[in-house]
Image (tube, rainbow, N blue to C red):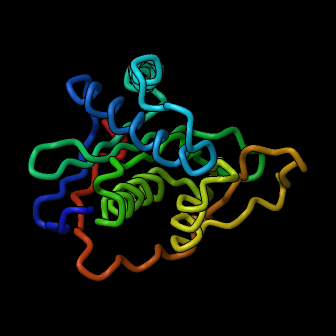
């Protein structure tokens, strides 16, 4: 059951090292939830997985080229995102490296708020295109990104045995309208820190 969204209580801000345990835990929980749809009998929310997520986010938070954001509701971190500049010969591009929401907060506007904060930072930094890879079997995430205007990247068609689908978003296109009642998060500084 999802808590009722409280727009005024949701804040998107730069993630810090103090947020690391909460981000690793929510990322592990989100991965477990979407992997269970494909592998229902496999345990995913285990100590080893949490340790892997912790190390991955520790690296992201330490990198100067990977701004990280978190969404907090009533002081509790409920979502996180990170992104990186992408080498693209044609135009300035950015990769949405991570975007995860605690499964207990799915459908409450957290993902949309994080996405909106990323869009504002990308446009302010002059990026004209964004890309991301999404697990092929994660239909919930694919639908989320499709609603926000992401489309399959015509330059990266998936192989028949592909596990991921590459999506792209033209940042020159106006952003999708916020969902009714969705919070208007504070914009992070362009550096994302």
Apparent side of residue 99 relative to residue 160 in the rendered image (left or right): left
Rendered-image quadrant of the C terminus = top left
**Residue at left 82%, top 61%?**
154
Residue at 10% over, 44% down: 75
The residue shown at (84%, 51%) is 158
Whether 138 is drawn above or below 82: the answer is below
Q: Is residue 111 above or below residue 161?
A: below
Q: Residue at x 72, y 46 (%)?
A: 164
Instruction: Report x, y in % for residue 144.
Output: 51, 66
Q: Position of residue 79 (x, y in %)?
A: 32, 47
As drawn, the residue found furthest toward the front would be: 41
Total marks in image:
0
In the image: residue 111, left or right of residue 10 = right
Residue 66 placement (x, y as % from top left): 46, 32
| 53 sits left or right of 71 in the view | right
> As displayed, is residue 124 above or below residue 36?
below
State left or right for residue 38 relative to residue 156. Answer: left
Quadrant, the N terminus:
bottom left
Residue 114: x and y in percent read: 36, 55
Q: Nearer the viewer, residue 36 or 31?
A: 36
Q: Residue 124 is drawn in which quadrant? A: bottom left
Is residue 24 placed above or below 48 in the rendered structure? below
Q: Nearer the viewer, residue 9 or 64?
A: 9
């Amino acid at each position: 059951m999802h808590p009722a969204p409280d727009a005024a209580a949701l804040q998107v801000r730069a993630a810090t090292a103090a947020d690391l345990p909460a981000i690793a835990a929510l990322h592990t929980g989100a991965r477990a939830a979407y992997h269970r749809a494909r592998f229902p009998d496999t345990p995913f929310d285990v100590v080893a997985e949490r340790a892997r997520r912790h190390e991955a986010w520790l690296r992201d938070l330490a990198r100067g080229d990977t701004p990280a954001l978190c969404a907090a509701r009533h002081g509790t971190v409920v979502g996180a995102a990170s992104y990186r500049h992408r080498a693209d010969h044609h135009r300035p591009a950015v990769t949405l490296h991570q975007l995860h929401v605690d499964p207990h907060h799915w459908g409450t506007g957290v993902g949309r708020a994080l996405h909106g904060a990323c869009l504002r930072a990308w446009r302010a930094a002059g990026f004209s295109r964004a890309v991301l890879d999404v697990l092929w079997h994660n239909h919930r995430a694919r639908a989320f990104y499709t609603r926000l205007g992401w489309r399959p990247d015509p330059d990266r068609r998936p192989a028949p045995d592909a596990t991921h689908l590459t999506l792209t978003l033209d940042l020159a296109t106006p952003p999708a309208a916020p969902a009714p009642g969705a919070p208007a998060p504070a914009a992070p500084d362009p550096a994302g820190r």
